[in-house]
Image (cartoon, coloured by chain):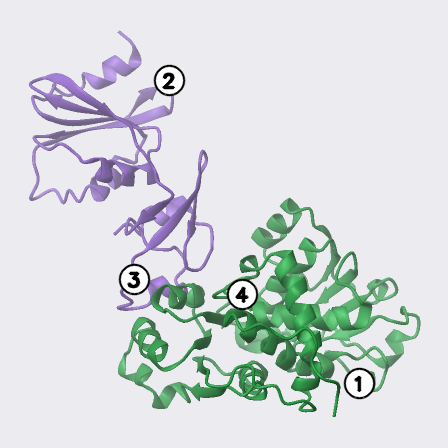
Chain colours: A purple, B green
Amino acid sequence: MTADEQAMRRVTAIRNGTVIDHIPGGMVLQALQIFNVDGRHSNPISLVMNVPSRKLGTKDILKIEDRELTQEELDRLALIAPMASVSIIRNYSVAEKLSIQLGDEMINVAHCVYSNCISNAEREPLPHRLKVLNTSPMTLQCHYCGRNQNLDRLVKNLL
Amino acid sequence: MNSLITMNDLTNEDIHRILLDAEKLLPVAKGNFHLPLLEGKILGNLFFEPSTRTRMSFETAMKRLGGDVINLGAVASSSVVKGETLHDTIRMVDGYSDIIALRHPRQGAAQYASDCANVPIANAGDGAGHHPTQTMLDLFTIKQAHGKIENLNVVLVGDLRFGRTVHSLSYALVRFGCKLTLVSPESLRLPEEIVNELKTQGGELTITEDLKPQLKDADVVYMTRIQKERFPDEDEYVRVAGIYKLVANDLSSVKNDMIVMHPLPRVDEINPDVDSTRHAAYFEQAFNGVVTRMALLCNMLNVPIPEKIGGEQ
């Protein structure tokens, strides 16, 4: 059994829902934040954290029961886990495999890390816009102030 | 062209064309020739931060071309203190004017305003971001002195860290193959992300703390004020304040056509005895704000400038 298979079996298989594999080790809590899972009003969730991975060194796995994440929700995940692989499970089988597809821009995913950027001014109504300049390594730039974003700080600014 | 947010909105060809337009408009800027190209047009001057030269030169530029100007006035007496968003202020002024000049303390404000407005936005300075109309008047001043803006030795001096003027200008100069010497105390160096970007664009940069040895080979020496208001700690300011002072004697062995520029206001970085030397270009530079902004206003409003403008009367 490979390390990845062992990791996957640390929690039981789910009947219906979404399994996200290859989240970089320690980032799964941010992934929950991205999917607006607050812990009290959610479907059953299983987390696996910091297990060995050939691709990533260590990785996290997230299983969300009875919820099929949309492509739009998954694309937000690119902020922290551009390499993630996503399976939609129906009746214990993989019904669909999805990949993260990033457009040219992330709209209302996170707000600019520079506090003096106009997009961080109180009550300004236009959307938060981050241009995707590159996906490997992930390089994002604020549409308004034009400054490149530090991803570690950006994750803390998720909307 | 429509809005002017950063120098990236202008190609090198646009820059050359606008500099030529500005040159044609010189007699109009000096008030020697009446040319109401912008009659019936209104400029909305929105200055959320103090400004003397930029605000007044936009106003003069519009009026010299027969246009009119409306002003936000003091922020303290406007609807901004009642909590109005930039979005709403822009939407309102968008209905009152044909073009807006915007200065705002927050970076990105000009791009944001441009997304809200139907009329063109001229970025007149957004926080520590960009100041492209200043860059255009700087390039015009350099061209007036040297006949070109390509392949010159330009020495930038002083506060290179916080000065948006220097940031916008250095990008433009590198595009035209100028060599840059960056003179500043270590704490006020050009931000690393800008240095890296300039190098990626092929910029040839020298970084030093020493001004005097750089003067001999310079074509342009661009002095800046060390901005007290940017320092969180007065001790740190005192350590670097007054570190660079140019006096007339320093210019004894410089090139004949070397010019000293400064975006003004100056404190003590250029001694008044430099004013009377042939190298002083900073007051000319301040005047050039009018003629360059005249050319920019015409271009942004798609108003063609006649090939020949009658001679001085």
Q: CA distance from mark 2 to mark 4?
A: 45 Å
Amino acid type indicated by mark 1:
Asp
Q: Nearer the viewer, residue B64 or B102?
A: B64
Q: CA distance from mark 3 to mark 4?
A: 21 Å
Q: Are marks 2 and 3 on the same chain?
A: yes
**What percent of the width, then of the height, locates residue B29?**
66, 85
Task: Give the structural element (helix, strand or loop) at label 3.
Answer: loop
Task: Kindly indicate the quadrant of the structure image that contains residue B66.
Answer: bottom right
Q: Nearer the viewer, residue A8 or B11?
A: B11
Query: What number is the disc on residue A126?
Result: 3
Contact between labelled residues 1 and 4, with CB atoms less than 8 Å apart: no
**What percent of the width, then of the height, locates residue B237?**
60, 73
Residue underneath mark 1 = B275
Residue underneath mark 2 = A54
- Indicate which label's residue lies in the foreground, 2 or 1: 1
Query: What number is the disc on residue B130?
Result: 4
Q: CA distance from mark 2 to mark 3?
A: 42 Å
State left or right for residue A16 relative to residue B126: left
Q: Nearer the viewer, residue B269 or A67?
A: A67
At a point 60% along the width and 49% down the height, the residue shown is B197
Contact between labelled residues 1 and 2, with CB atoms less than 8 Å apart: no
Mark yes or no: residue B175 visible: yes
